[in-house]
Structure formats: C-alpha cells, structure tokens
Image (cartoon, rainbow, N blue to C red):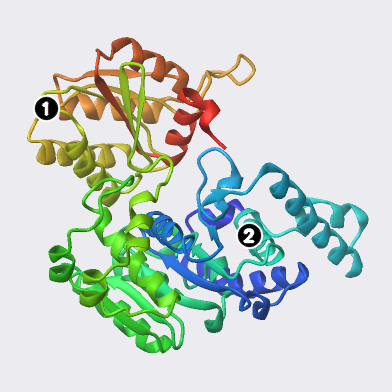
Amino acid sequence: MTILFETQNSSNLSTLNSRSIPETIDALKRAGYSTQDLARMRHIHVAGTKGKGSVCAFATSILKRYTDVGTFTSPHLTSPRERIALNGEPISQELFTASFFNLWDRYTQSSLAEGKSQDFAHGPDSKPFYFRFLAILAWHIFLQQGIKSVVMECGIGGEHDATNILPADAVSAAVVAQLGIDHVAMLGETVEEIAWHKAGVFKKGVKGFTVASPSQPGVMRVLRSRAEEKGAELIELEEDVLSAWDGVRGILQGDFQKSNQALALLAVKAHLGMDTEPVSSLKSIPDTMVTGLKEARIRGRCEVLQQDNIRWLLDGAHTKESLQQVAKWLAQTIRPNESLSLIFNVQERNITELLTVLMEAIQVETQRPDVVSRAIFTPNEQLAATAEEGDRDLSLQQMGADAMQRLSPSCAVEVCESLSQAIASARESTTKDSSVLVTGSMRLVGTTLLEIEPDALV
C-alpha cells in the first residue's frame, strides 16, 4: 500500500479516495461488524493538521473523569499499542496481542468462507492495510471492552479517512484543529483543498468545532460551506474570545495549547450534553474538567525530561506551523542565557526549508540570534548501519548541516550516522544545566526516547 503515500496524478488519487470508505466498510463487515455497531459508541472525531493529537489528549483526560473512554491516535512513538488507549493508558501487551490475532483470524476465516486459497487466506494480503487494520482493531477492542465513549483521531485528511466510516449517530462532536500544508500528495497543495478534506468529519445534526481564523478567509469559507453541505452546526471559537481566556497551565506546555484546550473542552461538553456556547463555556469550567486539562499529556509533544545534567526538550513537530509553535514553547521553557544543542531530522521533506522556519522562529521568539550553539543532524535510525547494510545515505543530513552553517555561522555543526551517535555527541558537548532540543520528526523523537529512557516506555 506504499502507493497510497506517493504522489498520484489526479485521476489515480480520485480513484483511491473514492474506494477508501467503501473498502473500509467492507473490511469492518469482514471483521464481523457493521457501522451501526460503531453507533453503540459515541465518538469525538478530531481532524486537523496541527494540534489534533493535543485535542485528543485533552479530551481524553477530561472525559475519563466522567466515564470509561477509548482513544485512537496516530502515529506512535515506539509501539503500535500507544495508538489504542483505555482511559488514557495504552492497552496492555496481552490485550493487544489477543485482540490482534482474534481480528487477524476473523479475516482469515472470512477469506476462507469466500473460497480463497489457504495461502491467500492465512497471509497478509487477505487483511486490510496497516492503518485501516489498526482503526478496526481499536473499534474491535472498544466494543469488546464495553466502551461507550471514544476519542478518535483521523489519520490523513478526513473525508476519505478510514475513521470516517462513522455514521452521524456514532458521533457526538467533530473537531477541525489548526490547518496547514501537509500530506499534499493526498490532500492537495493549498490549505483550502486540505480544509475541504478535513471538514469531511462534519456530520448531519452534529456540532462541529473550530477556531475562527480571520487570516485564512478562504479556509473559513470552505469550512462553513462544508458544514452547510453536511448539515452540521459549525461553532467557531472567535480569536477575541480565546484571547480573553487564560487557558489552563498544565503538563502540556505552550501558549498555543490554549486553542487545543478550548476545542477539547467544547467537544467534551457537547459529548456530555452540556452548554457549548464558547463565551459561557470558557467562563464556567467545572473543576473536574480543569483537572483534566491540567493533567493531559502526550509523550514526545512539548515534553521535558531532566536526565543527569541535561534537559531534553522533545517535540515531534514536522510541519512549518508546528515548528513555529516549537519555537514559542522553547522561548517559554529555556532558561536565561542558556545555550541550546539541537538534534534535527525530517522525513522525506525539504530539510532546508523546515530548518529555516525553525531557526528564524527561534530567533524571533527568544530574541537571541545565537541561542543554538550546536546542531547535530542524524537519520532516525538508532544504531549505525551494519557491514551488510553498507554505508547509510546521509545526503539529507548534510544538506541540513550546510543550511545551518548559512543560517547561523557561529553554530557548531555535525552530521552523525545514527541517533545513538548523535545523542552521545550531545551528551559530551553539553555543559552543566544545558538543554538539548530534539525535533523535526515523530520517529526521531520516539527513537530518542528509546535511547535515553527505554525503561519508561510502554
């Protein structure tokens, strides 16, 4: 299924998109369920380019204080189990394994019943592809566990996403978080095209929530048009209302989290049948919900780990908008006169462009042109390549190093062939009470956690 994530011409893409929902419904049926089985649960369905993971974390943290809640998110840092959570905690290895093979066997038996060969039925080709399988696995587990409330994050887009087989009576609230340019091969090259896809989560008779964006009038026109087309009630959180609200300071840091908190709060209130008028909703927040906002967390997002004499600042940001938010978070987190080491990598993206966005934003937010004193560029692989694998291609990392030397001539720059080597270099060169920022890729952050704190991971 790699083809789904490569650049497609418009006719191929249209064909793939048109098949997505019918194929997912068929896969659900082969697993022994119908979309009406999904309506036995009520879902907060979350789409967006940036912040949807945080919205899911806040919503889960609030909702679990009222009822049992299942959560499906992506991607994962170190284990696919992270994608499926019960009351905010990744499911156990035992539950994941048992449920995985139960679902796997259902597809095998379905293929045999259809007259397929033994080899085909027992093999992977008779199963849905990766993301679709995991989404159905999440529903399978939630239904088996008797879960009635679910927070569900879209994978890519919304309109044609596997999670969007949810019927309207299975959705209590739909959220479109911050929008930007990402996954252009699948969603289009303009933010308006992307907004069209994301707004696919709107459902007839269901409240949809988004933050009003006067700077993106085209996006707002698309969201309003799509809400009207779908028969959804779109509730826009105005900027002045959001600015007047202090937000809730908690584990997930950064002023930008305020909009994610507000969207999660409104969605949960809709889910629970409470008032969702933005002004009154933000003025009167039950203490239980405040606690939920305070205690929400996501590994690898605005995460601070103190280890010996080093503070590790971890964020899997990988788009222009999210890297700008990292710079804002960094400015609030870094100590006066502290120098910073940077470990950076991107996946199949323009490293020069993204690094430039990050560095310019850091300089603006911190008002310190020399705050990054050392930059290390590394692939995401934890270990060095073996002799059998041969030399690893480091051309992307070298491109980043060259760009860094142009952006900050006084910064020491290094290219490493593995993340282990990069972390060792950062440890050796980082002085007492200094920080290391790791960003650019969720996989980079996940592998960093495996390296620096393996025992703490699920």
Of pointers 1 and 2, the one earlier in the residue sequence: 2
Q: Give the amino acid at mark 2.
A: Ala
Which quadrant would residue 232 be assigned to in this image?
A: bottom left
Marks 1/2: CA–CA distance: 45 Å
Q: Which residue is mark 2?
A: 138
Q: Give the amino acid at mark 1.
A: Pro
Taking the spot 49% from the left edge, 24% from the top edge, the residue there is 451
Question: Where does residue 324 sit, x and y in percent of width and height?
Answer: 22, 46
Question: Where does residue 66 sit, x and y in percent of width and height?
Answer: 48, 66
Question: Where does residue 28 sit, x and y in percent of width and height?
Answer: 70, 70
Taking the spot 55% from the left edge, 19% from the top edge, the residue there is 385
Taking the spot 55% from the left edge, 27% from the top edge, the residue there is 455
Q: Which mark is residue 336?
A: 1
Q: Secondary structure at mark 2?
A: helix
Which quadrant would residue 185 be assigned to in this image?
A: bottom left
Depth check: 94 or 403 in front?
94
Question: Where does residue 124 sit, x and y in percent of width and height?
Answer: 77, 51
Depth check: 225 or 34 in front?
34
